[in-house]
């Protein structure tokens, strides 16, 4: 597995696979052809189907256009076999000769991969063990915890990096809580986080707690929907879950920053295992791979903060994922708004439930996290493309019918 720095990326929303990945691909291609006279970019499959709503063309044009004109070709009906989010970059010289043709895929969480690669083209693998079962066994053998495995494998600057991630997450919550008004796009969706935050304050402790978690998740997801700076955890669409849970726990239980960073390390490890063995891309495996994985990461982080054993943390992570299995990706109008924003709020609440559920046990359970990941992958393969970020099925289809 690669560094968890590849999983947690600080950047602007609304979509890691539709804006962050394509922007990075455009930057790479431009660095190889700064002298090009023109570019042609073809977007395939899911990337083309929901690219307009997700502002994929804008991300590519903003990068390439200052150097040379760009033509974008949309091919929503053509799915390249390797991954549904395919892109072809072509450059031409001043005599209209083709100088390079490059096919690359935006495989989720802002990562890029070329054909045949599983999880990205940017950095080497830094983790030797790639499954939770192996890592859990290592924890039992050594007496150490998951975050210590992260510390052993990553470079020394990992804590500085995670501190930056945590700062960006907190800033997104706080900006989102204060922001009011309407989100960009044709749905005219009103931001809700600030109202939830105010209303939650009027309730007694247990309801207030639930209301605040909703508010924090809404805040970050609404920031994402309006192109604000967020952290992929594991993706832009699912970026509200982990910060909501950690922000709430840090505030109410006064967990120190270093403990929050260790929780982030463990959450990153969970996300990494899914990314390596299955997918964190809604276009490839549906929303179970985005919000389901975010819930799993947040469940593990919460359980660790409350002193869970490695087995209990693994159980919490498994619960967070298992109970999102089969969840489809059907963003209305191709925007990361409905159902994505509310879905983050629900998943954050569910992560706290998974933590609690696991903490009532000794960590022994039947379905391992690795099994849930394998089932998620299989389920994702079995889902028709209607439910994988094409905005042609599910809620997206119903909305069109209501229009
Ligand atoms: S439905 Fe889920 S997977 Fe699809 S765009 Fe929204 S958050 Fe991402």
Image: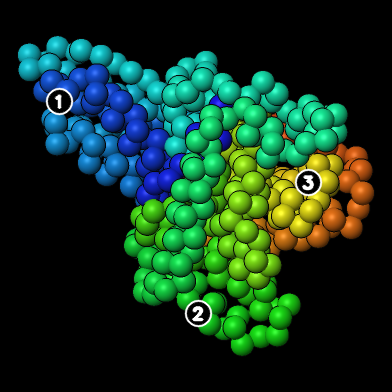
- Element at badge 1? strand
- Element at badge 2? helix
> Which residue is depicted at the point 70% across and 23% down?
129
For disc 2, the marked residue is 195
**Nearer the viewer's eye, disc 1 or disc 3?**
3
Inter-mark Cα distance, 1 to 3: 52 Å
Inter-mark Cα distance, 3 to 2: 33 Å
Quick one: 128 or 219, which is closer to the camera?
A: 128
Which quarter of the figure is the N terminus placed in? top right
Image coordinates of residue 58 in percent, x first then y, are: 27, 44
Image coordinates of residue 65 in percent, x first then y, are: 17, 36
Image coordinates of residue 173 in percent, x first then y, are: 49, 64
**Nearer the viewer's eye, disc 1 or disc 2?**
2
In the drawing, does residue 33 fall left or right of residue 133? left
For disc 1, the marked residue is 38
For disc 3, the marked residue is 313
Which quadrant of the view contains residue 2?
top right
Image height of 72 relative to 235, above or below: above
């Amino acid at each position: 597995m690669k560094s968890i720095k590849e999983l947690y990326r600080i950047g602007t929303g609304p979509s890691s696979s539709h804006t962050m990945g394509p922007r990075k691909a455009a930057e790479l291609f431009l660095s190889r052809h700064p002298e090009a006279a023109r570019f042609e970019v073809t977007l395939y499959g899911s990337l083309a189907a929901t690219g307009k709503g997700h502002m994929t063309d804008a991300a590519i044009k903003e990068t390439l256009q200052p150097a040379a004109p760009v033509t974008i070709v949309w091919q929503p009906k053509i799915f390249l076999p390797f991954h549904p989010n395919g892109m072809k970059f072509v450059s031409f010289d001043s005599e209209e000769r083709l100088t390079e043709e490059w096919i690359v895929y935006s495989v989720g969480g802002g990562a890029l991969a070329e054909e045949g690669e599983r999880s990205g083209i940017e950095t080497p693998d830094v983790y030797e063990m790639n499954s939770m079962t192996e890592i859990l066994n290592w924890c039992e053998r050594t007496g150490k915890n998951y975050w210590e495995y992260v510390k052993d494998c990553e470079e020394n600057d990992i804590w500085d990096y995670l501190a930056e991630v945590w700062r960006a997450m907190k800033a997104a919550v706080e900006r989102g809580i204060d922001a009011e008004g309407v989100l960009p796009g044709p749905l005219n969706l009103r931001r809700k986080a600030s109202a939830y935050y105010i209303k939650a304050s009027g309730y007694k402790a247990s309801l207030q707690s639930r209301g605040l978690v909703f508010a924090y998740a809404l805040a970050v997801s609404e920031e994402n929907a309006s192109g604000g700076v967020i952290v992929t955890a594991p993706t832009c669409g699912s970026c509200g879950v982990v910060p909501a849970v950690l922000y709430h726990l840090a505030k109410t239980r006064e967990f120190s920053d270093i403990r929050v960073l260790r929780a982030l390390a463990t959450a990153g490890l969970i996300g990494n295992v899914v990314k390596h063995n299955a997918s964190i891309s809604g276009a490839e495996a549906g929303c179970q791979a985005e919000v389901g994985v975010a819930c799993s990461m947040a469940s593990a982080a919460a359980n660790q903060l409350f002193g869970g054993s490695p087995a209990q943390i693994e159980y919490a992570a498994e619960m967070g994922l298992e109970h999102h299995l089969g969840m489809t990706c059907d963003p209305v109008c191709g925007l990361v708004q409905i159902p994505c924003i509310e879905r983050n709020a629900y998943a954050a609440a569910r992560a706290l439930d998974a933590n609690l559920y696991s903490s009532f046990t000794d960590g022994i359970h039947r379905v391992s996290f690795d099994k849930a990941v394998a089932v998620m992958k299989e389920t994702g393969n079995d889902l028709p493309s209607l439910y994988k970020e094409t905005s042609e099925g599910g809620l997206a289809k119903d909305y069109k019918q209501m229009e």
